[in-house]
């Protein structure tokens, strides 16, 4: 499996799309950090937590995974992938692992970037910028987990949908239309929706938040989502003719 | 012993039966040409062999195993498939390195093969900028990555220049002579004629014939080509004697199933001037058209279309 994951990393870093998405992600995260910092009063812990949030950029990990996996169909490289690795579930597993790791790396780097921008902003404003209740390590782990979760969902979506644009549009519709609609109609269900689950373990120091699951439960639910999407992708790919 | 074995294979796409109860075998040290009109089921058969398409019934094995049972299949089987592409934004070298990495093959093998297929100078260029022939050479390099004993190639000469075609012919011959097995589909019948030891000919997804090339062409009917300013008069005389005459361009005839002696004697006896009188041995092309004559073929939308020249329709 290690060689397949290494091959997936090589695929990632040898295309321009990967580097373009990474660049866009960092620019986006920088703008979000500046915007969030400017929108707060720089007074409370909640203001600081709000400024440091990277969840808004997690969609980029999902887009990266969708572009990479559905791109295998767009460019017909899926044929070569299955000729080299005939057991297709191994291809799916390698992609899940590789994109989870890429999501972790992207999440960590984004969190570091946001942290640096927010620190400079707070220093310039002479505002208190310590991290009470939540240490920097927790923040990094939560952010990395959230981005990895989004990336793995993107792997399943990209492999199942095959079409990059359709998969991205579907993801945006689910995240920004379907989820809010379900949350409005059935508030009790809202905490089980993907972004709420991700937020729950991204904010590990705030288990008292009643709108989110406890972090341990959220991680378990996230694994259910991952198992369902990856399992569905493996099942469908195993039976799909590559013509 | 059969290396490639297709046993009672049937594959349907919706209402269209692409391959029907097809069986054939290819042994060690053999180059087998896989022929048939467009839509005959060649590509479908090759893709079933390579585990890319599932069969409705029957099976296709390589060395007694299904392709999908190989942990690292490219060490046993190399394949060139129409449409098996490389990412256009990636360099040719990186394309090979990815395939090598996934099979635990040293990346130096990728560099060796770029050199071997004549792409060393373009190794760092993006595949999107490659010509069709260069992309085909890259596909061949990918097929050779694991130094496999078996090669399954779908139209590998597409886009290759004459030098490239000769190089490919020598390559395949060399591998077969060293105990390898090659199954190659091609619409360039003259190439198959020169290269293949035997031919598997299918139509409508069914086997028409499997036989050594020499046996097919020896058993086929020869022709005599005639050019004469009195071609019409000669044709009438030959037809009177029950000779089978085909008209070509103005002033030319082809006489089927007769030697040049018989035709020449009739011409001389009637004072007919001849500009050309030559016999032509039956070629694989003649055999192909005779065996697939009047064929109708299934096309992807499931309708039936009359047989067209090979270049006129896309293959399935």
Image (cartoon, coloured by chain):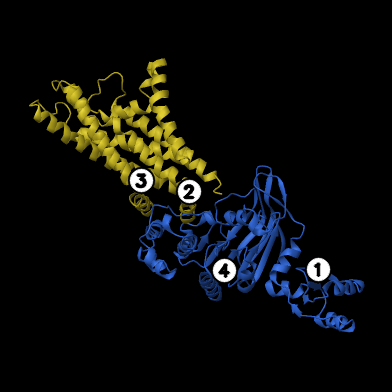
Chain colours: A yellow, B blue
Question: In the depicted view, which residue is nearer to us: B111 or B222?
Answer: B222
CA gap, disc 2 and disc 4: 26 Å
Estimate the spatial distance between the alpha carbons at disc 3 and disc 4, rounded to whole Å.
Answer: 40 Å
The percent coordinates of residue B108 (x first, y second) are 35, 66
Res B201 label: none
Q: Percent x, y for residue B293?
A: 76, 60
Of labels 3 and 4, the one closer to you: 3
Circles 3 and 4, Cβ within 8 Å, touching? The answer is: no
For numbered disc 1, what is the local secondary structure?
A: strand
- Neighbour tally class for label 3: few under 14, some 14-19, many 20 plus, Cα within 10 Å: some
The chain under label 2 reads A
Q: Nearer the viewer, mark 3 or mark 1?
A: 1
Q: Which mark is residue A88?
A: 2
The residue at which mark 3 appears reads as A17
Estimate how packed mark 1 is, as few (under 14), some (14 to 19) or many (20 or more) residues with alpha carbons within 10 Å: few
Gap between marks 3 and 1, in whole Å?
60 Å
Q: Residue furthest right?
A: B240
Q: State yes or no: discs 3 and 1 in contact (Cβ < 8 Å).
A: no
C-beta proximity under 8 Å, tags 2 and 3: no
**Pointer 1 residue:** B246
Tell whether label 4 touches label 2 (CB within 8 Å): no
Q: What chain does mark 1 sit on?
A: B
Pinpoint residue B137: horizontal percent, then vertical percent. 47, 64
Vertical placement of B181 versus B15: above or below?
Answer: below
Q: Residue at x 52, y 72 (%)?
A: B175
Task: Pick the residue in front: B269 or B99.
Answer: B269
To the question of a shared chain for discs 2 and 3, the answer is yes
Local crowd at mark 2 within 10 Å, few (<14), some, or many (≥20)?
Answer: many
The answer to whether dots 4 and 1 both sit on one chain is: yes
Residue bearing mark 4: B181
Q: Residue at x 55, y 65 (%)?
A: B157
């Amino acid at each position: 499996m290690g060689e397949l994951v290494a091959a997936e990393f090589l695929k990632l870093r040898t295309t321009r799309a990967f580097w373009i998405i990474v660049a866009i992600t960092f620019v986006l995260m920088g703008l979000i950090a500046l915007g969030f910092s400017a929108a707060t009063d720089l007074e409370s812990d909640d203001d600081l937590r709000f400024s440091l949030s990277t969840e808004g950029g997690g969609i980029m990990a999902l887009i990266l995974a969708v572009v990479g996996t559905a791109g295998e169909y767009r460019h017909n490289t899926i044929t070569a992938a299955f000729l080299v690795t005939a057991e297709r579930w191994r291809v799916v597993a390698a992609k899940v692992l590789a994109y989870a790791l890429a999501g972790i790396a992207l999440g960590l780097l984004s969190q570091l970037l946001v942290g640096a921008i927010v620190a400079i902003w707070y220093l310039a404003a002479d505002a208190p910028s310590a991290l009470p209740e939540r240490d920097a390590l927790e923040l990094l782990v939560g952010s990395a987990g959230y981005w990895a979760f989004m990336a793995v969902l993107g792997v399943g979506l990209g492999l199942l949908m095959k079409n990059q644009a359709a998969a991205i549009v579907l993801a945006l519709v689910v995240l920004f239309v379907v989820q809010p609609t379900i949350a409005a109609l059935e508030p009790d269900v809202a905490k089980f929706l993907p972004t709420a689950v991700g937020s729950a373990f991204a904010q590990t120091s705030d288990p008292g938040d009643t709108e989110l699951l406890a972090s341990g439960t959220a991680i378990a639910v996230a694994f259910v989502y991952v198992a369902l999407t990856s399992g569905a992708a493996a099942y469908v790919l195993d039976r799909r003719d590559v013509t | 012993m059969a290396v490639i074995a297709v046993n009672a294979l049937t594959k349907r796409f919706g209402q269209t039966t692409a391959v029907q109860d097809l069986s054939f075998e290819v042994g060690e040290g053999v180059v087998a040409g896989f022929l048939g009109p467009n839509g005959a089921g060649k590509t479908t058969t090759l893709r079933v062999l390579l585990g890319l398409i599932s069969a409705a019934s029957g099976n296709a094995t390589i060395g007694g195993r299904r392709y999908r049972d190989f942990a690292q299949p490219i060490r046993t089987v190399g394949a060139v498939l129409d449409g098996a592409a490389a990412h256009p934004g990636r360099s040719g070298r990186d394309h090979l390195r990815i395939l090598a990495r996934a099979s635990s093959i040293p990346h130096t093998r990728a560099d060796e093969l770029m050199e071997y297929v004549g792409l060393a100078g373009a190794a760092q260029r993006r595949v999107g900028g490659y010509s069709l022939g260069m992309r085909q050479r890259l596909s061949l390099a990918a097929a050779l990555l694991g130094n496999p004993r078996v090669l399954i190639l779908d139209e590998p000469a597409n886009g290759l220049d004459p030098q490239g075609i000769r190089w490919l012919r020598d390559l395949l011959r060399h591998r077969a002579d060293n105990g390898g097995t090659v199954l190659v589909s091609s619409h360039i019948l003259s190439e198959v004629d020169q290269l293949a030891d035997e031919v598997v000919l299918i139509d409508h997804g069914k086997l028409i014939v499997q036989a050594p090339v020499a046996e097919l062409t020896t058993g086929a009917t020869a022709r005599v080509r005639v050019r004469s300013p009195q071609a019409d008069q000669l044709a009438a005389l030959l037809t009177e004697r029950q000779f089978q005459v085909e008209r070509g361009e103005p002033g030319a005839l082809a006489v089927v199933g007769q030697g040049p002696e018989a035709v020449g004697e009739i011409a001389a006896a009637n004072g007919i001037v001849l500009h050309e009188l030559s016999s032509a041995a039956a070629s694989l092309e003649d055999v192909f058209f005779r065996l697939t004559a009047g064929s109708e073929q299934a096309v992807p939308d499931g309708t039936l279309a009359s047989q067209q020249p090979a270049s006129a329709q896309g293959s399935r």
